[in-house]
Image (cartoon, coloured by chain):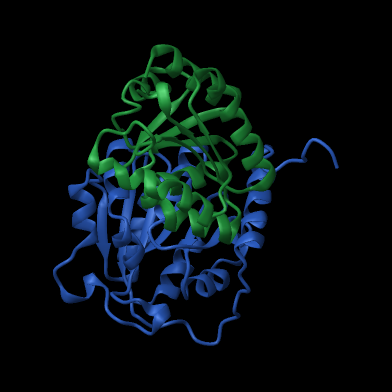
Chain colours: A blue, B green
Amino acid sequence: MKRFDCMTKLAAMLSDELVILSLGASVDEWYNAAPHMRAASLFQQQLGCVTPQAFGLAAGLPDRRIVSLDTDGGMMFNLGILATLGNEQPKNLFVVVWDNECYQSIGGPPTHTAFGRVDIAAIARGAGVPHAYTARTLEEFEDHCRKGLAAAEPYIVVAKVAGTVQPDIRRKHSDGREDKYIFVRHVEATEGITIMGPSEHN
Amino acid sequence: MQQSAVDAVIRGLKRAGVSIVCYLPDSLFKELYPALDADPDIRTIRVTNEGEGAAICGGVFLSGKRAALVMENSGLRASVEPLARMGLGAGIPVVMLMSYRGDMGENNWWAVPHGVTMEPVLQALRIPYVVEREEARIEQAIVDAYELAYASYYHTAVALSGSIVR
């Protein structure tokens, strides 16, 4: 199963959602797989922070569906967030973990999931998120996305994907500040709120 | 903490517009946490480590709500990686309220490293901070920390010490 194909399936189901995703090659893939979600996606968040940030966003916007596109390396960097999700039970958070069993962006050395013992979905269930599943086919992944995007409790799908990157796609230029401003202005426009407003004097 | 100091913290958080508090409990703020839990205007989120709490606070910032990360100052060390990435890399601010372990008067050996490292770590991250030891200054210190954080889009910190926490 290729991550880009999964992204294409997921993207087709999204419109009003907000997405936070990990750094790495998935940035370029999501940029191309979901062009209509570019402003609604905060790109390039770091290991261990993607799902916590998505949860914080979900806590602040309880009427908005939030999607976390996390990774095996990122989730294992901070497994504690699974226990926090288990206790907090957010109703509007769908988590995808792209599990390619490697640290792809630095050339592919294996993560802990590469040896057939570590099961992130099982860890999540043990942490109090019963709707945590592993998808190994595109059909399974699509089915979990459909359910996860409609769920009224936290829903996690660990997508077992190849360690390859979609070839010949347009690279996204990323800068943390520009990405933040684009995302924040989108949240402001779609929620009718001000997050980063004018200071006292100009 | 005296009840009056707990009240001052909560007044400060409310004046600053805070509606979500992430915390990992500690002993010096022992009385503060249940008061935050009980406050109808504040949602508390208990976290497994302070770095996770910092990242959740960053996500809350992106929603337009205001969050606080409340912790012992040892939590600053656990938060350095997400603070550096979010703050220096993206300009996503986190406001921290810390108990100052290891300050003058500390009587626990294990807390000494917290005092040794807190201010150098804040300075290394270029995080503006104040150390308050008088209850009368708590409320305004918290309000001021949010003013600066939302003007700079960078972290700020308030550490409470002295008679406030002993």
How far across and how far down the image is residue A36, in percent?
62, 62
Q: Nearer the viewer, residue B30 or A16?
A: B30
Residue that lies at the very extreme toward the left in this rendered image: A117
* Depicted B66 relative to depicted A27: above or below: above
Q: Which is more toward the observer, A156 or A177?
A: A177
Percent of width and height locating residue A187: 63, 46
The residue drawn where x is 45% and y is 74% is A4
Check the image and name the residue furthest to the front: B104
Q: Which of the 4 quarters of the picture holds residue B3?
A: top left
Q: Residue at x 42, y 46 (%)?
A: B118
Query: Does the rendering let one see residue B146?
Result: yes
State the quadrant of the N terminus of chain A.
bottom left
Q: Residue at x 20, y 55 (%)?
A: A123
Image quarter of the C terminus of chain A: top right
- In the picture provided, is A178 more to the left or to the right than B45? right
Q: Relative to residue B137, is residue A157 drawn left or right?
A: left
Residue, x 46% and y 15% (percent of image)? B7
Determine whether, in the image, residue A83 is placed left or right of residue B135.
Answer: left
Where is residue A17? Give x, y as percent: 53, 50
